[in-house]
Amino acid sequence: MNPIISLIIRSFVAVPVTAIVWLLSFFPFGQTFLFSSTIAIAAGVITHLFLGLYMQTRFLKKHRLTRKEYLYLMKNLSEAKRKIRRLNKALFGIRDIASVKQRIEIFRISKKIHKITMKEPKRFYKAEPFYFSHLDSVVELSETYGFLSTQPKKNAELELSLIETRKTLNELNKTLEEDLYKVISDDIDHLNFEIDVAKHTLKKEKDAKFHEENRWLK
C-alpha cells in the first residue's frame, strides 16, 4: 500500500467533507463560526482516520496479513529503505570509473527488491536473506570501499584491499540477483504456466484446422 497515494485519497475525501460540514453547520443550522469550524475539522479528521483504517484493512485482507504481521514487515521495510539510502550515497560517492556499471546494478537490484516487497509485503519472507544479511553486507562494504578509495595516498596493501572489495561486491551483486529471482519466482512459474497453456491452445487450434482442411480435401 503506497502511503503517498493513500494520503492523497484520504485527503481528497476528507477536505470536501470538512467544507460541507462547515457550510451545513454555519448556514442551515446557524451555529457560530468557531463551533462550525470545530465540528467541520473533527468530521474531516474522523473521515481521514476512518478511510485510513478501511484502506489498511482491505490491504491486509487482500494480502492475507494480520495487523501484527503487517507492522513487523513495515518496520523491517522502513529500516531497509534507510539502508538503501545509505547504499545509494556510498555507491555513488565512489570515484572509481571501472566499477560504475557494477554499482548501478547493485543499487538497481536492491531498489527493485524493496519496491516489489513494499507493493506485496508477503514476498518479504522470500527475501529474508536479502533484508537480514546481504543488504547489510553490501552497505558496509560500499561505505568502507568509498572511504578507502578517497584516500590521497594508497600503498600496495590498500590497493589490494580495494581490489578484494571490488571482487566481493561483484559476488554480492550475483547474490542479490539470486535474491531478486527468489522474490519473483512465483511470477516466473505463473508466466511459464501461461506460456504452456497458450502453446497447448495454439496446437489444438492448428490440429483442428489441419483436420478440417483434410476433411474438405477428401
Image (spheres, rainbow, N blue to C red):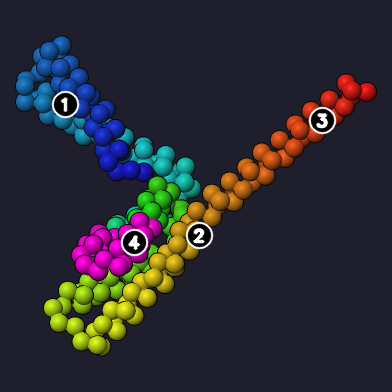
Where 167 sits versus 107, above or below? Answer: below
Mark toward the start of the polypeptide (4 vs 1)? 1
Q: In this picture, which residue range is highlighted in magenta? A: 84-110
Give the x, y percent position of residue 1: 36, 44
Whole-angstrom CA distance, mark 2 to mark 3, is 42 Å
Q: Label 3 belongs to which residue?
A: 210
Q: Label 1 belongs to which residue?
A: 40
Residue 43: in sight, yes or no? no
Mark toward the start of the polypeptide (2 vs 1)? 1
Give the x, y percent position of residue 218: 93, 23
Element on which disc 2 rests: helix
Q: Amino acid at mark 1?
A: Ala
Mark toward the start of the polypeptide (2 vs 3)? 2
Q: Are marks 2 and 1 in contact (CB under 8 Å)?
A: no
Q: Amino acid at mark 2?
A: Lys
Q: Residues within 10 Å of mark 1 (few under 14, many from 20)?
A: many
Q: Amino acid at mark 4?
A: Lys
Element on which disc 1 rests: helix
User: On the rendered structure, is 177 left or right of 47?
Assistant: right
Element on which disc 3 rests: helix
Q: Amino acid at mark 3?
A: Phe
Whole-angstrom CA distance, mark 3 to mark 4, is 52 Å
Give the x, y percent position of residue 202: 71, 35
